Amino acid sequence: MTEAFIFDAVRTPRGKGKSSGALHEVTPINLAVTALSAIRERNQLDTALVDDVVLGCVEPVGEQGADIARVAVLAADYAETTAGVQINRFCASGLEACNMAAAQVMSGQSQAAIGGGVESMSRVPMGSSGGAWASNPEVAFKTYFVPQGISADLIATKYGYSRDDLDAYAVESQKRAASAWKNGHFRRSVVPVRDQSGLTILDHDEYMRPETTMQSLAALEPSFAAQGQNFGFDSVAIQRYPEVERINHVHHAGNSSGIVDGAAAVLIGSREFGERSGLKPRARIRAFASIGSEPTIMLTGPSHSAEKALRIAGMKASDIDLFELNEAFAAVVLRFMEVLGVSHDRMNVNGGAIAMGHPLGATGAMILGTLLDEMERRGAGTGLATLCVGAGMGTATIIERV
Amino acid sequence: MIDYAVDAEGIATITWNMADRSMNVLNDHSIPAFAEKVATAIADKAVKGVIVTSAKPDFIAGADLAMLQQVRDAAAMFERGNAMRRMLRDIEKAGKPFVAAINGTALGGGYEICLACHHRIAADNPKAQIGLPEVLVGLLPGGGGTQRLPRMIGIQKALPLLLEGKKLAPQAALQMGLVDKVVPPDRLLAEARRWLVEEGAKNLVKPWDQRGFRIPGGNPHAPATAPVFVAGNAMLRERTFGNYPAPLAIMACVYEGCLVDIDTGLKIEARHFVRLCTTPEAKNMIRTLFFSMGEANKLARRPKDVPVQKYSRVGILGAGMMGAGIAYVTAQAGIDVVLLDTSLEQAEKGKAYSQGLLDRRVQQKRMSQEERDGVLARIRPTTDFADLAGCELVIEAVFEDRAIKADVTRRAEAMLAPTAIFASNTSTLPISGLAEASARPENFIGLHFFSPVERMQLVEIIRGRQTSDATLARAMDYVKKIRKTPIVVNDSRGFYTSRVFGTYVSEGLAMLGEGVAPALIENAGRMAGMPVGPLALADEVSLELMHRVRRQTMKDLGDAYRPAPGDRVLELMVEKGRIGKKAAKGFYEYPAGEKKRLWPGLAELFPLAGEQPAVAEVIERLMYVQSVETARCIEEKVVTDPREADVGSVLGWGFAPARGGTVSQIHSVGLASFIAGCERLAQKHGGRFAPPKLLREMAARGESFYAI
């Protein structure tokens, strides 16, 4: 099997996902073009060598619709021979895109491919693409559909994480993200979003609240109590988990991931591709996996996908130096660390989506880049990136430095 | 059956008039007959417009449930439905106007005919009911109701009507848009004719057959409608625990069908309808809630040849919770009530209970002040047994203590005519024993009411050893008069309802004692379709009372006492002072102003077992234990009619209606499979699950409790 290597990883900064956010004026296609152009320019890449661009996008309708990956390829002035495909594995789309790009290389069918993702949550809001899962009565019934916030609260309830546990985690995420920015840990990957004249629109993650404390979080109301109690979702969760008496609503805006806009891209290719392009591989993709898990609790997939990827790689969790797990909700991370016995000092060391936000389709590719940068910075050998996924899935990728 | 006439102006009138029935229904005879008249009217060029009406006091009551109950063959049913659907589409696309002149009640398929007409006029008859109540017997409106109603009034307004099976009086139906106009009954046909002549021609094409039609309020994916489904799906599960296929199928019909054109929508509805007709839930609900309950309400068990007893005066001994409730329903039925207690203050308090209920009805505008005054004036509080003179019936609802009961029996009988009936509202003490205090035990009977009396539909009539046929017949006349549903059982400890209901609670307690998580027990109870979990129920009943009844039973039975599996749990709880809801301390704690929650102390008292059962196993135990005890009741001839066991369980303690009751559950699980399940449970959990001989013999002979 051909080995797949990461040659570069870029991301846009994350803008607040609302009309007052800095990136609201930027179309999703331009976010994607920003990332793809950076890959080309930074590496003086002959894009004719790139066989495919795989972009994750969770709401692929409207201006994110109609295969945004191929349209971004054209808009970014890539070679017209480069194909483009948009994929959707909900929140893990960005990482799944990288895995699919890697798979193309590993199978020998592509010499290079870009994995990445894009989501302008301010312009194409969550839920825009509809779907059968929540609304089709028979499907919703059969799958015990609940919104993700209810699932996160169910995890906290079932495994006994208190509001203080979650808030303490969130405060630490903010602290780590602030310190990472201050010390330039994201410098290598973040490419500013600029206008037609080259004026900077955004060059930093604007969602962060480094001043966050336990006291400031304590003032926040639970986000999903009304939904759960007034619209039946708590009952649905309990009917799937009848050992639970009532759902403890402990997640809120401050310990859940932020809604933001952004895009990311990761250049993946074979050793030969590197040689032909004069690029040095930064890491080898060792293994990856996606799994399905119980859809009502929904967000417990990361540990299962990580275990599967570890099994494929012939590794144990203790062999991994650094972890990035998307901070969709604080309970997701706490649960993962508990299941795999991962200490907090190896997990999300530069903060995560609670502090910086979670642009659904792009996050997976963003955290893969963050993981690689940090591995290089501290000389770590191995890293694992993973995300929880809607409808009960998980996706994980293991990389090692070369 | 269906009359047809055309007048000089070319107005055809199709009149439903089924000879052999009190109400028109849709069945294999009437539907083709109606279809034929519809076809004639459409084909006849001389006919300019058509009135559909009825010659009976009501319009059409709906489909014949006996016909639907027979359905087993999906293909045949689908075909039969197609004929009806085509006929209704023919009406819509006839090119001449049809108007429904709704003279009285129009329900289910009856109202669906109205929906296909181009205009609906109802007579202003406040007793008439209009709506689509199919969901109440486990079905859906299969004659286009789930497609035409949302297209006519919008999804948001239509769904609650369809899901709750609401029946509306004509004025309310007008407000909701179910009918277009309400007129005085004597102007109904004239208005129908006027509409046909003056407005018919402008209304020949149904909105959904017009180009560019949009459902009012938007289709299922419109921003205003989408939450109706996303939250509605969850709220439906919250309410039904997934036990009722019908409301889910209705949601599915409206969702899937309103995304496409009407003809495709009707096909979608037809498929869901046919499937529903064959579900055990529909069979169970039709059997128990319609047929068996209908039989009970018609007093099918009443001994013939006994003249109907009229009641003018009823005495009630004890003005506590039960006595006060019985007084209320009796006075409501137009009978004078003598409400007796040991102090006038107590008796007055019992009357005040009625006043509270009546005042609320007046407030809700469901009763006039005069009616309220009339009912209240019928209740006479007293402490004097002499006031019982002239009562045709006396019901005692005093403390569950033999001595007290014997005393009031003797004192009351002294004042009564020799023909008068004396009834005990005991829920636990055998009637034949209580009758020993009576000078005329043949006139002594048990009338077991349920709490709260004004809301609980069932009365369990207990025949003592010496109770006469005449007494039974006359007691049933009283139950009918107060508009309750009677079942008749023979004397035994706990009779039927208390005995079987007790097994549900007891099984819950037993599991707690085994270390099953209390939340799992409680959720399983509700997921099985019971109104509350067994532990919450124990709190409601009062653990102290259960404890006392148990002591009494032990005393009465001596060595014959069969310990209940939850006895130890009960003992421990009462020991700890956790005596139930009244004390705000039971299996639950009851913080003021908040929802009750399981008492955390349970964890210490009943440590969790390392391995927890699957919820399906917990449900099976809670439900099977009731059916197997019912089978024992039938074997011991405590209950003699399976239909009464079913009705009694659903009305008496809220046994899961979708399972049809304690006997229907056995029937729909299948006798062989139920026996096998019981044997498995008996092996694991004890002899209380052992299937009685009756069931084995029935299985061996290939018999079943019901034909369908």
Image (tube, coloured by chain):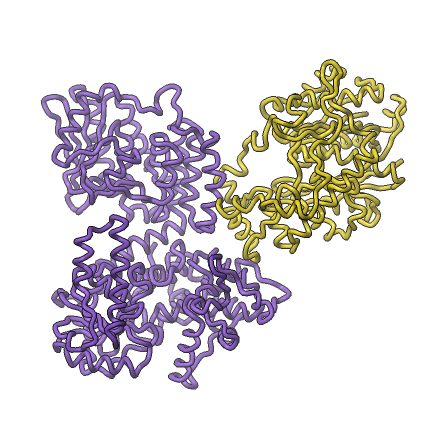
Looking at this view, is A2 or B609 the one in front? B609
Looking at this view, is B490 or A124 the one in front? A124
Give coordinates of residue A383: x percent, y percent: 82, 41
| Colour of the chain lettered B | purple
Left or right side of A397 for B506: left
| Colour of the chain lettered A | yellow
Give coordinates of residue A361: x percent, y percent: 67, 31
In the picture, the quarter occupied by the N terminus of chain B is: top left
Q: Is A392 above or below relative to B45?
A: below
Give coordinates of residue A21: x percent, y percent: 65, 27
Q: Which corner quadrant of the image does residue B303 belong to?
A: bottom left
Q: Which corner quadrant of the image does residue B545 belong to?
A: bottom left
Q: Is A320 above or below relative to B382?
A: above
Looking at this view, is A366 or B366 the one in front? B366
Give coordinates of residue B332: x percent, y percent: 21, 59
The residue sitting at the bottom extreme is: B559
Left or right side of B18 for B361: right
Looking at this view, is A102 or B172 the one in front? B172
Left or right side of B487 for A210: right
Task: Say whether residue B309 is visible.
Answer: no
Q: Is A328 above or below relative to B390?
A: above
Task: Say whether residue A214 is visible.
Answer: yes
In the picture, the quarter occupied by the C terminus of chain B is: bottom left
Q: Is B661 above or below relative to A166?
A: below
